[in-house]
Amino acid sequence: MDDETNGPDDEALDSAPDEKRGFRIGQASLPARPLEAGLYLVATPIGNLGDITLRALETLAGADVLACEDTRVTRVLLDRYGIRNRPFSYHEHNATEAGEKLLTALADGRSVALVSDAGTPLVSDPGYRLAQSAIEAGHRVIPVPGASAPLAGLLGSGLPNDAFLFAGFLPTKDKARRDRLAELKSTPATLILFESPHRIGATLMAASQVLGAERPAAVCRELTKTFEEFRRGTLAELASAYEDASVKGEIVLVIGPPLPEAAPDEDTVDRLLLELAATLPTGKAATEAAQRLGLNRRDLYDRLLKLRQGA
């Protein structure tokens, strides 16, 4: 049996497609039409095998070549829906060799469907390189959307979703992890990260210290699976909860956007205005104070005039 550590399965690449291409849902057998030439990026379930679209099933059954990360994982999905297409192994360890063969198939006018082990291809997997090469070679690249772990985590987190940034995996070393968090600290959006279960405690602690202990967050574990879990709280609360916890399963960490800074009190504003006005004209003093405090320049200008009149 071929798996993700072996080279590509050339028989899967060279074999002629079954003339009776199709898939099965329950007791119903449905035909799959042959696809036009191109690279089809097909989203697959992230846990619950029911989270597959009809279009994805038809694409997997109808493609001339079906490329995947781990053929054993993909066969589970194919068997569930009665798809006879034989998967071809394409993953980070053989991406150069296998990618060239897939590009040749595209050049020969064949249709290639690419799936990852779970979720949407190209998101933290080597499919990005294949898609980029296919575009550069002038081939069609067709997304077939569906399940996505980052979006599922965002939806279940209860955190703002009007603006969000998917930042993938953080570095594994503590300093590099903290440096990356510092880069993300001021991003005016909800952050979505992937994390492994044995690093989630350290990551939450670093995030609490770098991003702010009171920032809201959610640890989303085993999404769509039997033991799906959402744990919500501040970064400090979650860091404490996971400090010594034994955790299993895949994790999406969602962190809310930066909290608004508390407005400075009137005494602080007045002291700064008078300090700046001692060496700067009124207008420039108001401009400098506005930049430092994040307040309206016109309001500060009027306030400084009143302070001078009162003095």
Image (cartoon, rainbow, N blue to C red):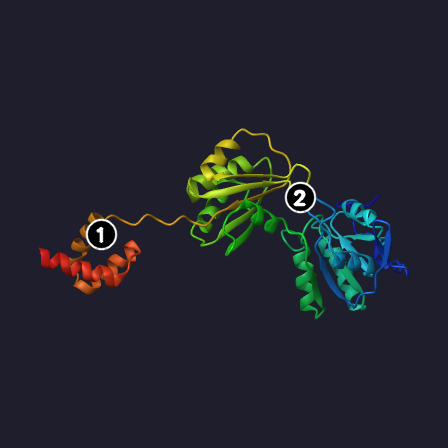
Quadrant of the snapshot with the C terminus: bottom left
68 is higher (above) or lower (below) than 204: below
Say which label, 1 or 2, has the lower sequence index.
2
Q: Quadrant of the N terminus?
A: top right
Amino acid type of the residue tagged 2 in the rendering = Thr
- Residue name at image x 74 percent, y 48 percent: 50
Residue picked out by circle 1: 269
Residue, far left: 311
Q: Is residue 24 left or right of residue 180?
A: right
Q: How crowded is mark 2: few (under 14 residues within 10 Å), some or many (20 or more)?
A: some
For residue 265, above or below residue 306? above
Residue highlighted by disc 2? 224
Q: Which circle, 1 or 2, is nearer the viewer?
A: 2
Provide residue 260's location: percent of width, then percent of height. Answer: 38, 50
Snapshot quadrant of residue 101: bottom right
Q: Which kind of residue does numbered mark 1 sit on? A: Val
- 285 with respect to 47 (left or right): left
Q: Which residue lies furthest to the front in this view?
A: 27
Q: Which of 16 and 287 is in front in this view?
A: 287
Which residue is rendered at x = 73% and y = 63% of the image? 39
User: Callout 1: helix, strand or loop?
Assistant: helix
